[in-house]
Amino acid sequence: MIRLPLVLFFSAVLFSTGVYGVLARRNGVLVLMSIELMLNAVNVNLVAFSQYVRDIGGQVFALFVIAVAAAEVGIGLAIVILIFRNRESINVDEVSLLKW
Amino acid sequence: MTGQEYAFVVLALVGTVGAVRLVTAKNVVHAALYLVVTLAMVGSIYLVLGAEFVGWVQILIYVGAIVILFLFGLMLTKAPIGRESLDNQQRGLALLVALAVLAGLVFLIQDAFHWGDRKMNLVHNTTGEVGRSIFQHYVLPFEAVSFILLAALIGAVVLARREERE
C-alpha cells in the first residue's frame, strides 16, 4: 500500500526540477536532459494512476512515452550536433537567428 | 507507513537529489551520471509500484541507451566546465518559475487527492498482461509509435550526416 499523493508529490518535484533545468541551462545537451526529467515525471504519474485505477493502459502509455522520448533524444542530439558543427558552440541563447 | 512506503520514500529522495544535482552540476559529464541515478531510481520506483515491465524497460532504454546517446552528444560537442558557462543569467527567475510550478502542482494534488484515503493496492502486473493489452487494445498506437521511431531514426541520420562536397 502506497498513498497516491506521495507518488504524485515526487512526480511534481521531478517535473519542477526539469522546468528549472530547461529555463536555467545554456548548454543544449543539458536542456535535453532536463526535458527527460519532465518526461519521467509524467511517466511516474501514468504508472501510479494505472495502479490506482487498476487499468493497465497507463503502463502501456508509459511505454509509448518512453519510445517517443527515445525518438526525441535522437532528433534533438542530431540538431545539437548540427548547431555545434555550424557555430562551434551549443549554447542555446546564442542560437537567435530566428529571433525577431 | 508501510514498508513499501519507506522503500518508495528512500528511492524518491535519492532520485530527487540526483535530479537537483543534475540541474546544478558544474561538469556536463557529472550531469549525465546524475541523470543515470535519477533514471535508475525512477525505474526502481516502477518496480516498487508493481509495474515490472515498465521498470525494466526504463532501465534498458533510459539507462542503457539514452544516457549513452547523451554521453556521445557531450563528447562530440566540447562544453566548457563551470557553472557560469553552463547556466544563463536568468537563474533566479528560473528558480522562481520552478517553485511556482511546484507550489501549484502540490496545491492541486493536495486539493484533489486528500492525504491518506487514496491508497494504491499494489498488484503485480506481469509482462504478459502488458503484452496482451498492447496487442489487443493498443495495436494502432503501437504501430504509430514504431512509425515515429523509424521516422526519427531516418531524420537523425539525415541531419547528422556530413554534406558531400561534389
Image: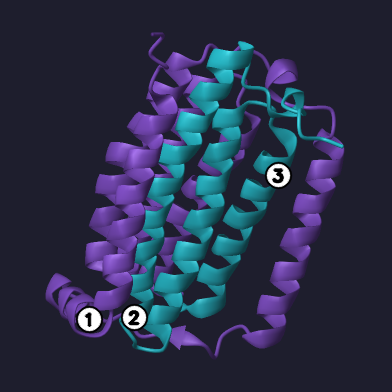
Q: Residue at x 34, y 88 (%)?
A: A54
Residue corresponding to mark 2: A57
Colour representing chain B: purple
B12 to B130, vertically: above or below: above
Circles 2 and 1, Cβ within 8 Å, touching? The answer is yes
- Secondary structure under tag 1 reads helix
Q: According to the image, label 1 marks what residue?
A: B133
Q: CA distance from mark 2 to mark 3?
A: 30 Å
Disc 1: host chain: B
Work out whether mark 2 precedes mark 3 in sequence or the reverse, and give the earlier one.
3
Q: Dividing the image into 4 quarters, which one contains the C terminus of chain B?
A: top left
Residue lying farthest to the left in this orientation:
B128
Cα–Cα span, label 2 and label 1: 7 Å
Which chain is displayed in cyan in the rendered image? A
Tell me, yes or no, whether the two marked residues, 3 and 1, touch with CB atoms within 8 Å: no
Left or right, B61 with respect to A69, comes to: left
Toward the viewer: B91 or B34? B91
Q: Residues within 10 Å of mark 2 (few under 14, many from 20)?
A: some
Residue density around tag 3, few if under 14, some if 14–19, many if 20 or more, within 10 Å: many
Q: Which residue is mark 3?
A: A20
* B89 lies left or right of A48: right
